[in-house]
Every structure is written in C-alpha cells, then in structure tokens.
Amino acid sequence: MRDSNPYAVVPATVCRVIEESPRIKTFVLRPEEPFSFRAGQFIELTVPGVGEAPFTPSSSQYERDHLEVTVMEVGFVTRHLHRVKEGAVLGLRGPYGNYYPLEEFKDHDLLLIGGGVGLAPLRSLLLTVLHDIEEYRRVWACFGARTPRDLIYKDALSACRAGGKVCLNLSVDRVPEGESWDGKVCLVTGLLDEVAPDPATTRVVVCGPPVMMKYATLALLERGYREENIYLSMERKMYCGLGHCRHCLIGRHYVCRDGPVFTYAAIKDEENIWE
C-alpha cells in the first residue's frame, strides 16, 4: 500500500486480455510500482473516468512482475472494464482485507471448492500453494461451471497437477447441444463423492455464487467437515473496500475489513449470510 495511504492509486498497464468465457475476462496488469498481496486479499481496480470496483487477484502471491485480475461482466464498471484493450492504463489500490492462513493449512490436506468467477481467488490460492507444494499433504480441487463454455482457466487447470499431489475434479451443470465434454455432469457438490481427504483434519476453502457456497457448506457439514476448518470467501458484498459504505455488513462483520475470508464457524449465526 503506497505510503500507507489506503486511497493511493498505483497506475497499471494492461499487458494482456484473456477471454476466459463469454462473460469473463482475465486482465494481466503490470503495476508501475512494486505491488504485492497475499492470496485471499482483494484490490480496488479503477477504470479512469468511469469508477472502481473490488476484485480478488487470480495470480500467485509470489508473482512479482505482474498481477492478474479475473472479471465477470455484471454491471456498470465491469461492462466498461470488458471494453479495455491492451496498452490501457488502469488504477490499483490496496491490497485490503485478510488472507488465507497458509501456515494453518500446511501439513494438512486442502480441499478447494469453487464455481464460476469464484475460481479467481481459488486459482490464486492454488498457484500460491503449488509454489511450496511439499509443505502440504495433498490438494483436492472441485471446480464447476454451468456449461463447458463457462469453465474458466481451462489450460491453467490442466497444467496445475504437481507430482500427484493435486487431485483435480471438474464438472458442468449441463452440456448444451453442440458442446463437447468428457467430464462429470453434475453440480459441483456432486464432486465431493470423488474426493477422500479426512474430514476431521482437512482445511476447506469455498468460493463461488452464494447458492453454491450455501449447499457446498451444508454438504461438507453432512460429511463431517468441521465448521472451524471451512473457509468462505465472501467478497461478493464489498464496494468501497474501507468499511465506510456499510454495504458489506454481515451482522457485525465488515467483509472488507474483517474478511473477506471467514470460517463458517465465525459467521454461521449471523442472519442471511448467503444473500
């Protein structure tokens, strides 16, 4: 965070734009000044003359030359962001919030469950873990999408297996006519029957659409995974990033300041956590 000023903006050049799916793009950014983050934290990305919005980086925290941000077109700022071309200059501020407790994850099995653009923070976590893969027992990844066309990071996911320590499981909800798919056709929760870590000790990270997170969490609890070991990424509710707008409140918790990473045990008693 430049000069310890939370409002300071670092210019960043768009080096590459990757079309991940019909509605999702990844922007590869090169900041003009050193910029670092921890996996799970978020940044505010500014489109000059338009506005800004919060996003969780999708690249490894160990990558120092560039930063990757994956964006779904869902509103005013993201619509303009999707029109940005290579060579454009955007603004970064942050990073903000807490991050995945990697020291707590080490020497344990790690189970990642995600869908849609919710794979962005999970990709960052996965790439970060792969950097020190020998410090973890095994990584189980269950990633889903609506259709084969909607599955993002296809090339990166197929290349992320590291010496047998990563077990990658992919699914789609349905396969429209004209599309091909040789994997599972089921909700991402159906992939939990394909994994075999010890529920008593495994650390789980869940990120995706609210309804997916809800039913994934319920399915985990039914299988004996512990509330304090289920980590939820709740960044969907954020806006200003500094706790001023109160848009991200979950009960007494500010997602942007107290999160965006929470254990299920920490927020389970708050009302409407899945909205």
Image (cartoon, helix red, strand yellow):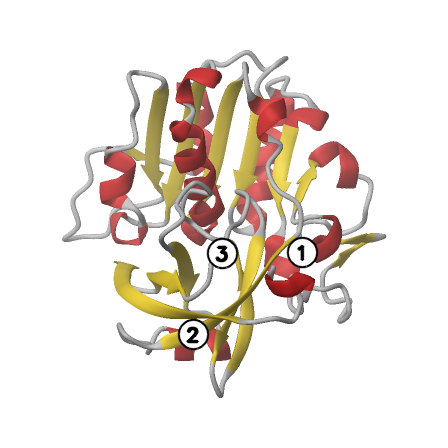
Q: Residues within 10 Å of mark 3 (few under 14, many from 20)?
A: many
Give the camera-side residue of 136 and 275: 136
Q: Amino acid at mark 1?
A: Glu
Mark 2: few, some, or many residues within 10 Å (few <14, many ≥20)? many
Residue 275 disc label:
1
For label 1, count other residues whose C-alpha is less than 10 Å away and answer few (under 14), some (14-19) or many (20+).
Answer: few
Residue wearing tag 3: 35
Comparing 25 with 221, the one in front is 25
Q: Which element is circle 2 on?
A: strand
User: What secondary structure is found at the residue carrying circle 3?
Assistant: loop
Which residue is at 55% across, 20% downward?
106
Residue 189, x across and y down, in percent: 48, 33
Alpha carbon of mark 1 to alpha carbon of mark 3: how far?
32 Å
CA–CA distance in space, label 2 to label 3: 14 Å
Q: Is residue 186 above or below residue 65?
A: above
Quadrant position of residue 214: top right
Q: Position of residue 122 (x, y in %)?
A: 46, 41
Q: Amino acid at mark 3?
A: Phe
Which residue was labeled with disc 2?
90
Residue at x-position 42% and y-position 16%: 134
